[in-house]
Image: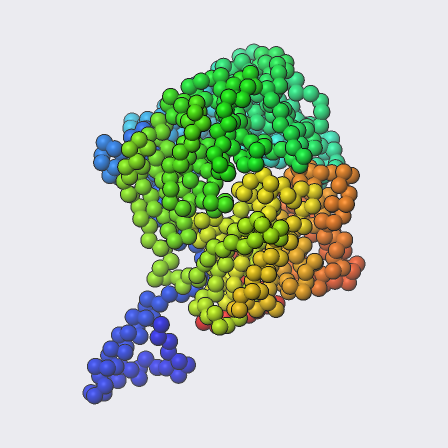
Amino acid sequence: MVKPDKNFNLADIIKPESQNMKKRSLVFFLLVSNLLFAQRNLTIAEATYGQFLQFSPEKYNRPSWKNDDTFTFITKTNDSLIAKSKTNNWDSYLILTAEELYANLESNFKNSSFNFTTLPSDLKWISDNEISFSVTDKASSKKYLIYYNTQEQKVINSFVYKSNGAEETVSRNKDFVAWLDDNNIIITDNKGSNIEVTNDPVLDIINGSHNTHREEFGIDKGMWWSPKQDQLLYYRKDQSMVTNYPLPQWSSRVTAIKNIKYPMTGMTNEKVSLVIFDVYTNKKVTLQTGEQDQFLTMVTWDPSGNYIYVGILNREQNHLKVNKYNAATGIFEQTLFEESSKTYTEPSQGLVFNPADSKTFLYFSDNEGYRQMYLYNTEGKLIKSLGHEDVIVSDFLGFDKEGKNAFYIGVTNQGLDRQLFKVNLKKGKTEQITEISGTHTIVLNNSKTLFVDQFNNTETPNQTKLVNLENKKEIKLINAKNPYQGIINMPKMDLITITAEDDKTPLNGRIIYPSNFDANKKYPVMVYVYGGPHAQLITNSWLGGASLFFHYMAQQGYIVFTIDNRGSFNRGRDFEHVIHRQLGQIEMADQLKGIEYLKSLSFVNSEKIGVYGWSFGGFMTTTLSVHHPEIFKVGVAGGPVMDWKYYEIMYGERYMDTPKENQEGYEKTSLINKADKLKNKLLIIHGAQDPVVVQQHSMEFIEACIKANKQVDYFLYPTHEHNVSGIDRVHLNTKIANYFFDFLAEPAKN
């Protein structure tokens, strides 16, 4: 790029001097061209939201199959539903606009106003020409769950209930919808009549919520209709014995207290049961799961509607029973099989029955090292292990029509790639369908004959194609351009591999270089860390799994470095379980191997290394800061765990056991008793309404710093919970960046 110096004046160029006129005209043209088309750096707002908005690569938004030969997607502006059909040579055509939809709704529902410009976010296909979605009319405080025929453009079924209704689940024949009114369950029929299923006191008893057991163990819903549709199974969580935890609410004239129930490690746990409600008799039956201190997981109806399967996990989380119960009486029938572990066993989803064979189901477990599938019958006999090499089953995608094959997304390439697999249930033979290294997002049609593959990797923003599973023929639909090219001066990024502290385990790493990188210079470093279970920071995907905020920091002259240490996700049981009872220790050792790698690079300024992380990453940031202030000169810890005894039972005890059982481990991993070791600049950020890592963590650490006469910086977001979302996230990223600029290294001058 041609850059004018400080005394440059464009007027000097355009003076008509005959002998230099042609030459100067050329210089002027080149200069203006460069000024117009020069690439620039990201703004902090773009760094916060740009990758999801203006810099999102071209792709299909919410693709879904209308029928076996037609798939649909929503336009980028979210105002139109578009289809591509085999009968139309896969050309695009319009099905529905938001304007048409809401106009038709207002003609169906008198005295209601649907003044929206975008299609509902939960819109989905129920059958050919039939979609379902929900909309809320704020004027009337009503919520509408609607079934709509797109061809005839009319409502064919609907439910109307309170606008605060949540977690709706519809019966098989669409006669009833169960929904939550705060902590109680209401059933509404399609004529508008309501049945009050529960009427329990607020806070003490929670019914039908996906938040049962704090959403651990793969729990994503709290109510299930019977296949016969006449019975509703639901969680009943009694947390009256759990201590109230106060969250100050700052918005009122006099600050009020909102109490939540927060069962800390080693303390009294909630008591959960499973109840069946009969719509026609209004009678309830409670499954006889026992009175033990335990967790109820993997809740699944038998296809016959006569039985219910439940995973019974003990409080220690190292012994799982898969039990069968009679749906009519609630009586325990049998234990199908059991699973135990020296560390912990972690159920992650319910059983999946084969629609072509109601006597067999898939069970998901990492008991043999990797999360894979096992085919069982309803008597508990293992029919076939369906695991393939060290592939981890990430997302189950369903069966073909004959029930002979199952499809899933598998994690491969040491956790970096996502590929489509097909496994034959009878032979156990597995076939990898997609091959190109990277991240494949797959949407299969119902018969599993065609699929839409949206693919990206570190070099590819997005390539979308339609693939025929039978003959492997492909139709290319989208080849997205680099959305930054010609606009943003994007830093170079590399994925790397280093060896863990055990000198044998490979770890995935990512390094983002400063803009206009010069290997002869030395640069400051921001280490971004998470490090804990169920999270993976580095993938073979567009931007490598990184946030644009890290590219922004690289544009300011920083190297941004990340590794997925042992204990993180998608590398198998042993890789993750190695941190059991000693959180932060092996993770720290692996992070230091990353520092060792950084210091081997000639262009790294080893005197200017800082670290930033949130949640478990905030815990790791503080851990690294107090143990190694000679390395990490600056730290920013967001929502940090400071002592695991203040964390909740389900997650905390899985990885640490109770404080009584693991006194040494809790003492070793606590950061409160290490505040006196703080020597670097540390900023702690917390949400005052955080119900996950409660504010007590950071307050206790700050108090320990005061007692040790150690200076620490603190910033509170009064209205935010565990993270900072919405427009305020721009403020958050600005604060983090400025802390590094103020105390580690000023931004580079471009």
Q: Nearer the viewer, residue 748 or 121?
A: 748
Q: Which of 305 and 186 is in front in this view?
A: 305
Q: Residue at point 42% right, 40% down?
A: 419
Residue 153 falls in image quadrant: top left
Please identify the quadrant where the C terminus is shown.
Answer: bottom left
Q: Residue at point 41% right, 49% down?
A: 457
Instruction: Identify whether 531 is placed above or below 157.
Output: below
Query: For this view, does 17 lie left or right of residue 262?
Result: left
Residue 316 falls in image quadrant: top right
Q: Which of 223 and 298 is in front in this view?
A: 298
Instruction: Identify whether 578 is placed above or below 271.
Output: below
Residue 13: image location, x then y, percent: 29, 82
Query: For this view, does 480 lie left or right of residue 564?
Result: left
Q: Residue at point 66% right, 17% down?
A: 288
- Residue 164 in sight in this render: no
Residue 165: image location, x then y, percent: 53, 31
- Residue 68 in sight in this render: yes
**Colour scheme shown:** rainbow
Please identify the quadrant where the N terminus is shown.
Answer: bottom left
Q: Residue at point 42% right, 52% down?
A: 458
Residue 373: image location, x then y, percent: 50, 30
Query: For this view, does 198 lie left or right of residue 96?
Result: right
Total marks in image: 0
Query: For this view, does 653 lie left or right of residue 11?
Result: right
Residue 714: image location, x then y, percent: 66, 58
